[in-house]
């Protein structure tokens, strides 16, 4: 049995507030997750010998450290299945970009192998397996846009308007662990209740519109200079420590384009009302963005224009 062309979509954090820190060192967050149509692709063949064989891991990443392998092993251990899997995947989502690529790959592995092995776990059981793999993994099993609290595991469904995004990848990956351990990280942002974000979304639903010329008709929570709710508390830390990320942020600001960093960085996103606007904005960035000069590395590695997803493409593969 096989499952080919299984998607693993990226996520963006529409805002990300660090509201505290537990005694065990884990940070308490509030964030809004949205999936976007920028996907890795995985292929699975069922094996009868119980072995997990994975092709396509990141260079320098040990087989047993790959989240895809760890997810497969976790499902094997939890269910006692005698099956194994031959897994291949192609990476599109950049590592160290704050887009949740590794977490999404792990979640799609759990969803696909639960079906391929006919292990029959429901959503709650798979989310419990997902959390030890990483704080972002459960939301991909949850399968819909979500308001997240705790370490990211307390999820409530969000209804979000259709939006389109330009994603910008600076030519510098950002390791998550170093950002959360930074002494200068803000860890006391006041908590909000979900309805505050929901009400803000409703009020601003008609106002968003990033244009190719860099203007924006949206307004932010408490300021007219940004079309986004709240902020990403990790962005100042990342920009202070990673030159290419900082240069990208400053260049976008100089163009009058409102962008926000997602997750722990270093990718930025720009929210648009239509796919045409997103593509025009992407083209403007490609044309104007400084390239490599005098042997220097280019500031930006890649850009994409893609829709936001209303649901995870595999949401209905499991029972709720």
Image (spheres, rainbow, N blue to C red):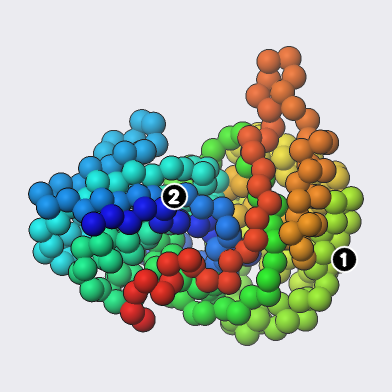
x and y percent of residue 207 in the render? 83, 72
Report whether 218 appears left or right of 51. Answer: right
Observer-nearest residue: 319 or 191?
A: 319
Q: Residue at x 68, y 51 (%)?
A: 305
User: Residue 133, relative to residue 241: is it above or below?
Assistant: below
Report whether 282 appears left or right of 82. Answer: right
Residue 3 appears anywhere in the view? yes
x and y percent of residue 64 in the render? 24, 42
Residue that numbered label 1 is attached to: 217
SS category of the residue bearing label 1 = loop
**Total numbered circles:** 2
x and y percent of residue 154 in the render? 43, 75
Give the image quarter of residue 115: bottom left
Q: Residue at x 26, y 51 (%)?
A: 45
Observer-nearest residue: 264 or 119?
A: 119
Residue 300 - label: none
User: Residue 207, relative to residue 239: is it above or below?
Assistant: below
Q: Residues within 10 Å of mark 2 (few under 14, many from 20)?
A: some
User: Residue 307, relative to residue 302: is it above or below?
Assistant: below
Q: Residues within 10 Å of mark 1 (few under 14, many from 20)?
A: some
Disc 2 vs disc 1: Cβ atoms closer than 8 Å? no
Q: Residue at x 55, y 67 (%)?
A: 33
Q: Quadrant of the C terminus?
A: bottom left
Q: Residue at the far front: name it.
A: 1
Residue 260 appears anywhere in the view? no
x and y percent of residue 250 in the render? 77, 42
Observer-nearest residue: 313 or 75?
A: 313
Residue that numbered label 2 is attached to: 41
């Amino acid at each position: 049995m096989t499952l080919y062309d299984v998607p693993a979509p990226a996520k963006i954090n529409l805002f990300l507030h660090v509201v505290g820190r537990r005694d065990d060192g884990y940070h308490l967050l509030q964030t809004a997750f949205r999936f976007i149509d920028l996907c890795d692709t995985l292929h699975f063949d069922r094996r009868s010998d119980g072995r997990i064989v994975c092709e396509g891991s990141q260079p320098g990443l040990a087989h047993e450290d790959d989240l895809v392998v760890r997810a497969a092993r976790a499902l094997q251990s939890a269910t006692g299945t005698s099956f194994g899997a031959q897994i291949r995947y192609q990476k599109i989502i950049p590592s160290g970009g704050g887009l949740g690529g590794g977490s999404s790959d792990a979640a799609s592995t759990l969803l696909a192998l639960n079906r391929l092995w006919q292990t029959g776990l429901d959503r709650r059981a798979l989310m419990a397996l997902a959390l030890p793999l990483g704080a972002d993994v459960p939301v991909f099993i949850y399968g819909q846009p979500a308001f997240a609290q705790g370490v990211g595991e307390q999820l409530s469904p969000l209804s979000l308007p259709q939006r389109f995004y330009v994603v910008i990848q600076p030519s510098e990956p950002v390791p998550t662990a170093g950002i959360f351990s930074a002494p200068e990280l803000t860890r006391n942002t006041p908590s909000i209740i979900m309805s505050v974000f929901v009400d803000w979304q409703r009020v601003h639903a008609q106002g968003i519109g990033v244009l190719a010329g860099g203007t924006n008709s949206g307004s932010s929570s408490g300021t007219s200079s940004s079309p986004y709710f709240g902020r990403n508390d990790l962005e100042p830390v990342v920009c202070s420590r990673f030159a290419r990320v900082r240069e990208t942020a400053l260049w976008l600001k100089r163009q009058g384009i409102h962008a926000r960093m997602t997750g722990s960085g270093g990718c930025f996103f720009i929210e648009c009302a239509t796919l045409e606007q997103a593509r025009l904005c992407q083209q403007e960035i490609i044309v104007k963005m400084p390239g490599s000069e005098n042997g220097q590395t280019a500031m930006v590695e890649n850009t994409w224009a893609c829709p936001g997803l209303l649901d995870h493409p595999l949401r209905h593969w499991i029972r709720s």
